[in-house]
């Protein structure tokens, strides 16, 4: 298996593990995601989409463009949420949710999206021209498993969001009425 394909599939699995962690906070700890958190999940799913395109259609600049644009949108949303909690309203909690290793999920979002941008830029710069267009359409079990897990998590996320927000806009405590 090509090293680039392993890196790509591993990136899918890493971001999927982040979404699984977010589901643990949502379902295991009963910490419902805020609207900004849901937008960050959408941006992560869009990053996964770009990685899945690399898996099935080869490494192309357009796919990395999707990853970078999605990560830029995600880092903007995450940074907004970080800035909202730097100086909270007096009497309110300093963060939203439970911290992991001293940082909240939205703070980790900034790190993850920045890493996605950096990794995409590095791969675009150092990727051999022969690897850009994929001539072999054989997809390994590892690659298929990563993509299938991503699709499953996307479906779970859609269903969970529908239950939380229904078909309208989503406010802090469920659907806006």
Image: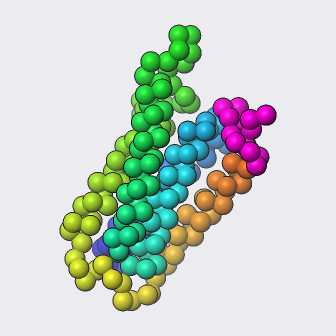
Residue 138: % across, % down: 44, 87
Tell me the quarter of the picture where residue 68 sits: bottom left
Compared with residue 116, is residue 52 higher up or lower down, i.e. above or below? below
Q: Residues in magenta?
A: 163-177
Furthest residue in direction top, as rendered: 90
The residue that appears at 38% across and 70% down in the rendered structure is 62
The residue that appears at 34% across and 47% down in the rendered structure is 114
Residue 18: % across, % down: 49, 50
For residue 29, say whether it is visible.
no
Tell me the quarter of the picture where residue 134 sits: bottom left
In the rendered structure, does residue 29 fall within the stretch colored magenta?
no
The residue that appears at 52% across and 57% down in the rendered structure is 45
Residue 22: % across, % down: 56, 45
Rendering colour mode: rainbow
Number of numbered discs present?
0
The residue that appears at 49% across and 53% down in the rendered structure is 44
Residue 92: % across, % down: 56, 15
For residue 7, say whether it is visible.
yes
> Is the C terminus in the top left, top right, bottom left or bottom right quadrant?
top right
In this picture, residue 73 sits left or right of residue 134 = right
In this picture, residue 102 sits left or right of residue 20 = left
Compared with residue 89, is residue 64 higher up or lower down, i.e. above or below? below
State the residue in front, 20 or 157: 157
Furthest residue in direction right, as rendered: 177
> Is the N terminus in the top left, top right, bottom left or bottom right quadrant?
bottom left
Compared with residue 9, is residue 98 higher up or lower down, i.e. above or below? above
State the residue in front, 176 or 20: 176
In this picture, residue 17 sits left or right of residue 114 = right
């Amino acid at each position: 298996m090509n090293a680039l394909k392993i890196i790509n599939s591993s990136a899918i699995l890493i971001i999927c593990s982040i979404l699984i962690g977010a589901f643990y906070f949502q379902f295991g700890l009963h910490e419902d995601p805020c609207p900004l958190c849901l937008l960050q999940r959408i941006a992560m799913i869009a990053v996964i989409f770009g990685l899945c395109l690399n898996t099935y259609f080869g490494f192309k600049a357009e796919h990395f463009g999707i990853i970078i644009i999605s990560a830029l949108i995600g880092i903007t949303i995450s940074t907004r949420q970080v800035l909202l909690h730097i100086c909270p309203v007096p009497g309110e909690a300093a963060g939203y949710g439970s911290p992991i290793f001293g940082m909240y999920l939205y703070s980790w979002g900034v790190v993850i999206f920045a890493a996605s941008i950096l990794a995409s830029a590095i791969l675009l710069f150092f990727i051999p021209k022969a690897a850009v267009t994929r001539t072999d359409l054989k997809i390994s079990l590892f690659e298929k498993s990563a993509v299938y897990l991503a699709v499953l998590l996307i479906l779970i996320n859609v269903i969970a969001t529908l239950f939380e927000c229904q078909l309208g806009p989503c406010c802090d405590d469920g659907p806006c009425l």
